[in-house]
Amino acid sequence: MANPFKILRSPIRPRKSIEWANLGHGTAFESVSVKILWRCDIGMLSDRRTLSHSLLPSAMVVVPPGILYLTRTLPVFALPSIATYVIFTKLHQLDGSRWIPVLAAVLVQPIVFGLSLLYTSIAAWRDTARRGAIPMPQIPDRWPGGLTNLALLGKSLESGYPADAFHEWFEKYGNTIIVRLLFENRIGTTEPANIKAILATEFANYWKGPADSERGNSLLGTGVFNTDDEMWKFHRSMTRPFFSRERISDFDIFDKHANDAIGQAAARLRQGYAVDIQDVASRFTLDSATEFLFGKSADSLSAGLAYPDSSSQKNPPSFLNHPSNTFVNAFLEAQRLHVARSRFGTKWPLNEFWKDRVKPHRQVIDQFIEPILNDALAEKARLNAEPKDSKKEAETLLSHLLQGTDDKQIIRDEILNILVAGRDTTSATLTFAVYMLAEHPDMTRRLRGEILDKIGSSRRPTHDDMKTMPYLRAFINETLRLYPPVPIDSRTSKNATTWPAAGGRPFYVPANAKIIYIVFLMHRRTDLWGPDALEFDPDRFMDERLHKYLTPNPYMFLPFNAGPRICLGQQFAYQEASFFLVRLLQKFKVFTLAPDAQPEEMKPPASWKSSPMKGREKITFGANLTMYAKGGLWVRMEEA
């Protein structure tokens, strides 16, 4: 397989350029001459988006998203109007009527658009019939283009409950539906058979797709989570060796940062303040991930822990301005904006017409990453100066990546992508695990008893110890079931296909359709998990329910995805979460939520109480690239 890093370093040969000047008073282009590459030869990477960071000249002015979108769409959009205007001008040049060509040019647009929709619908209908399939249930909308449902999705993002709108649709129309948003198809599903096809059996027919990759480019760049095909394969092959059993069994890094995090939490509790365990877990996972993957900890725990907003003690400037806090705040806001784009599909640039709202946050993120990268580059230069026979094999993922390229932006992209997986997902797992410890004191006692029986109250756990604690693994699995770190994911269909429908003809899946599979809701389906699916019960992963429900249908439990794109760090995450929970339960014996410290606006609304699914929650949720507790998870813990 070709090395994409080498391809990216290939010379760019501009074929044609356009000069834009004086595009309007007050715009970014006022009195500026901008040369834009019209066409480039870069081997197999024909997608010009890969050039957006480090390959284009640094002096080049960045074109706003809305302008770029219009340059792609306006020529095709305007062609019918231009042709109509010319024809009617010729027809009416004798009688001097000037308004008729203009009116015809305007009216032709809805006509052409309507005919295009009609043609597409007829083609899809014929293809559906040819395959012996049926259309999916379509969510009605009283406004053209799905504007009502678009607004409903926007409200769902802010509701504090993942996939709220889809939950209502699934309840009413079934577990596989199609909704039109801004005239684009969006398919939603919680059917394991469909998700199995997407992730495994028909993997080649589903990808992130150019639209999703473009949407994520300003945050994730060309990293593993934002690429397809050869570049994605290359990232996987580069990353896989660093999650071997030997590497993830070395608990020195975990122990250092866990002791620091838990020690700080204990000290804060002794002062009489509640602790945001989400903040504690996030700092532990950030420091552990950066040291494990890059050889140098981000040292976020040195900032200290946050005080509750309701307390008289306020967070000092040294905490608020700590580089790790600046990074995390920028990272969360960039993710929020990235997810908000998804509502608008391919038309998201029109919502950020003059400015890419993600890029300023990405710049803050890069400033945080820069020292880690510079240190690694300096180490690479030092090693290159040594005799060849004395050089060592790369010891970290970062040093291994630097053997393939010196391009700092490509490395920044990959670092950021790996940090999403290495920090955010495990942090979410630990946060919701402690949430369940606080909600189920009987399970806390049982889990702590297993830990004390197998390891004791102070000994550091080993890799082999983890195998002797089935309830610990079951507890983590049940946390992942009810609170999966990645609650919602998506792919795009390349070609039209079909999915099996329960008790009837298959559903028709159009080509180029955005498909959203919602793990959060699938994990809570009572028809899949049994009548107690909404109950937190780790024993379901140990008793007869495991063999009754999960064993014959493994694709109904997908906290780490599945198929060729399954999470490479799955076992790393299990080990890290297990280690932290062991150390936490060696230190503390009782966990309780601290509603007095939880921000009032982040508590569940009264309307949730009437819902069988939402009514049991004491916190609200945010879902960016990963799920988190809005306002943190404030707890009090009693030391053993």
Image (spheres, helix red, strand yellow):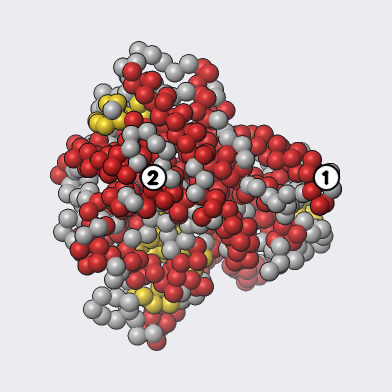
Position of the C terminus by quadrant: top left
Choose the circle earlier in sequence order: 1 or 2: 1
Q: Secondary structure at mark 1?
A: loop
The image quadrant of residue 144 is: bottom left
Please state the horizontal and vertical placement of residue 51, each as a whole percent of the image.
70, 54
How would you rate the neighbour count of disc 2 (Cα within 10 Å): few for under 14, some for 14-19, many for 20 or more? many
Residue 458 can be seen, yes or no: yes
Left-right relation of 412 to 22: left
How would you rate the neighbour count of disc 1 (Cα within 10 Å): few for under 14, some for 14-19, many for 20 or more? few
Q: Nearer the viewer, residue 312 or 136?
A: 312
Please state the horizontal and vertical placement of residue 516, each as a whole percent of the image.
40, 60
Q: Residue at x 38, y 81 (%)?
A: 128
397 lies above or below 256? below
Left-right relation of 386 to 555: right
Q: Residue at x 79, y 59 (%)?
A: 10
Left-right relation of 239 to 434: right
Q: Residue at x 71, y 37 (%)?
A: 374
Give the residue pinned by disc 2: 578
**Residue type at tag 1:** Glu
Which dot marks residue 87? none
Q: CA distance from mark 1 to mark 2?
A: 40 Å
The image quadrant of residue 595 is: top left
Which dot marks residue 386? 1
Q: Nearer the viewer, residue 576 or 628?
A: 576
Number of numbered markers = 2
Position of the N terminus by quadrant: bottom right
Residue 352 can be seen, yes or no: no
Please state the horizontal and vertical placement of residue 482, each as a whole percent of the image.
29, 50
Left-right relation of 62 to 624: right
Please state the horizontal and vertical placement of residue 92, each as a whole percent of the image.
62, 68
69 lies above or below 416? below
**Residue type at tag 2:** Ser
